[in-house]
Amino acid sequence: MSEEEPPEAGDLRDPLAEAVPERVAESEPSPAEPFAPPPPRATSAALALLGCVVLVLGVVALLLVRSGGPPPTPEERARQPLNPLPKAPPTGLAATGAPLYEARCASCHGAHADGGAGPSLRARRVALSPDAVIAAVVAEGRPGMPAVTLSAEDEARLIAYLRYLQGL
Ligand code: HEC
């Protein structure tokens, strides 16, 4: 004879009776799962993005301040001097061209060719022009600039002095 224990009370329970509370539990809002999206995450993402934008703007502003404003246009750059004015006095051929420049050019282009009524002759635009182009401007003149006829020797002296003023 087997001594079977009487079945536990639980075994006799109607399966349906157990299912009911489960179904009720499904429909109940669970306090462990909040339905609202977690606001701290969204806020920190926005703050990180703002931080990046501020950083980029700061770097751009710093670069602009250090470079002294926006970069010059090619036209502005052409008018900037190529080199600083030399500190040592001119020598050789350039020294002989100085009186020619002072007598015939300085009144309009300035004592150091930095410009006056006429444009700067220390500008990159002129400093990077070949001798023949400068000689042609002098020989032919320009609007507001009289033509000047020079001997080949004086032309070489004058241009040597201009090259000196241009720091070349
Ligand atoms: C009466 C004033 C005057 C005198 C004197 C004068 N210039 Fe000029 N020069 C000007 C003016 C104004 C211009 C600009 C003309 C133009 O806009 O095309 C100019 C332009 C030039 C240019 C061209 C510059 C450029 O950017 O294109 C050169 C080079 C030049 N002069 C050299 C000389 C030299 C060298 C002498 C002396 C022999 C001289 N000039 C004497 C008024 C003068």
Image (cartoon, rainbow, N blue to C red):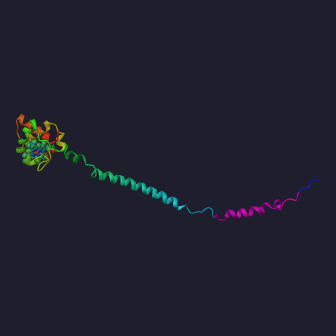
In the foreground, 122 or 144: 122
Q: Nearer the viewer, residue 30 or 99?
A: 99
Residue 115 higher or lower than 30, as above or below: above
Q: Which quadrant of the figure contains the C terminus? A: top left
Q: Position of residue 161 (x, y in %)?
A: 11, 40
State whether residue 17 is above or below residue 87. below
**Point 76% across, 62% down: residue:** 18
Q: Residue at x 7, y 43 (%)?
A: 101
Q: Is residue 36 magenta?
A: no
- Residue under the point 36% across and 54% down: 58
Expressed as whole percent of the image width and height from the top left, the position of residue 12 reads 83, 61
Q: Left or right of 42: which side holds 53?
A: left
Picture quarter containing residue 164? top left
Quarter of the rendering containing residue 24: bottom right
Q: Is residue 48 above or below residue 87?
A: below
Residue 105 screen position, x and y as percent: 8, 45
34 displayed left or right of 13: left
The magenta segment is 5-30
Q: Quadrant of residue 87?
A: top left
Does residue 139 appear anywhere in the picture?
no
- The quarter of the rendering in which ligand 1 is drawn is top left
Q: Is residue 149 left or right of residue 12?
A: left
